[in-house]
Image: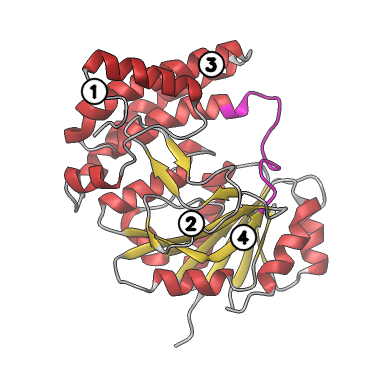
Amino acid sequence: MTQKAYVIIPNWNGARWLGECLDSLLAQTAQAAIVVVENGSTDGSVELVEKHYPSVHLVKHSKNLGFAAGVNSGIKFAIQQGAEYIALFNNDAVADKGWLKELLAAVNKYKAIGIATGKLVSFDKTFYDSTGDLYTTWGYPYPRGRDEPVSNKYDKAEYIFAASGGASLYKAALFNDIGYFDEDFFAYNEDTDISFRAQLAGWRVYYTPKAIAYHRISQTGIKGSGFTHRQTMKNLPLLFWKNVPAKLMPTILPRFTIMYLALFVGALKKGRGWPATQGILQMIILLPKALVKRRFIQGRRQVSPEYIASLLTWDLPPHTNKLHRLRNIWWKATGREARHEA
């Protein structure tokens, strides 16, 4: 039986990289339909696709809908076409020829696997961008292995907490079960959110080191605008309040509060106090809606809080020195040993 796979590429003014991205996807050893979600680009991206890639489907929008709403429109298009598997891929990345084939093999390894992810490596192939994403007991998601030199450290196929939206594969049945990406996130952390929701609903996320893609890291962000700080301060509480089971709140909420305040202070020191404040204000407006979503998500939960706890990282991410110092203060205040949080 022929597998129906679609690859969705959200694009906003990415014409300079889009051709190389599409070339790598059209050269895959596993066949797939390619969909570019055009988020109101003004740099000739549409003309590039229409002229040079006539086999690629275009889903056009007049403005930038953000990552979540953009990919949702592509996912819905793919499902309407009968897609069984839907991959997401960044427009500033290129895929190894076997990338899609390996993800399809991984997602079909067991029935419960709903998401498969692989190695996302820097474009110069020297260090990792992500080898799957983790969520900590401090309410802080992060990409495993980021900025570490490429090695054999992450060569083991295994279950993982979450998948990066930059280069991962989803079963269409998963979206039919738990819904689409949360458009209130706009961008950042929406991929961790959908993986968290999937885990709560009984799906699994699987990492395969054989699926490799190369990413021009941070090329598509909005630089110098405070965008990252605004989105971070808005989205981290939405991710937390929607998904963390009530039984885990006493463990995670105090840590999350400390971490969140530390992030705000850090934004102030970097001159990003206003964008961070905007993010907090937007979060407050969206929080009642998130709590309604929480009721639905937790009401459909198929796994125990203990199972979710077993998936969490009981520590802070690396390279967060200030947060590590705060963690040590927390340990002293709560009488925990500084070597481990368990």
Amino acid identity at mark 3:
Gly
> Which residue is located at x 42 percent, y 30 percent?
236
Q: Residue 230: give x, y in percent of width and height.
A: 55, 25
Q: Secondary structure at mark 3?
A: helix
Q: Of marks 2 and 4, which one's residue comes earlier in the chain?
A: 2
> Which residue is located at x 34 percent, y 65 percent?
113
The magenta region covers 215-228
Q: Residue 108: give x, y in percent of width and height.
A: 38, 74
Amino acid identity at mark 2:
Tyr
Label 2 to label 3, Cα distance in Å? 31 Å
Question: Which numbered tag is attached to residue 336?
Answer: 1
Q: Tell me: residue 271, above or below residue 243.
A: above
In depth, the one of 194 and 211 nearer the eye is 211
Q: Of marks 1 and 2, which one's residue comes earlier in the chain?
A: 2
Label 4 to label 3, Cα distance in Å? 32 Å
Q: What crowding class fits label 2: few (fewer than 14 Cα within 10 Å), some (14-19), or many (20 or more)?
A: some
Q: Residue 171: give x, y in percent of width and height.
A: 41, 66
Question: Which numbered tag is attached to residue 154?
Answer: 2
Q: Secondary structure at mark 4?
A: strand
Q: Of marks 2 and 3, which one's residue comes earlier in the chain?
A: 2
Is residue 219 a member of the stretch shown in magenta? Answer: yes
Q: Nearer the viewer, mark 1 or mark 4?
A: 1
The residue that mark 4 highlights is 213
> Which residue is located at x 31 percent, y 31 percent?
241
Q: Of marks 1 and 4, which one's residue comes earlier in the chain?
A: 4
Question: Which numbered tag is attached to residue 266?
Answer: 3
Q: What crowding class fits label 3: few (fewer than 14 Cα within 10 Å), some (14-19), or many (20 or more)?
A: some
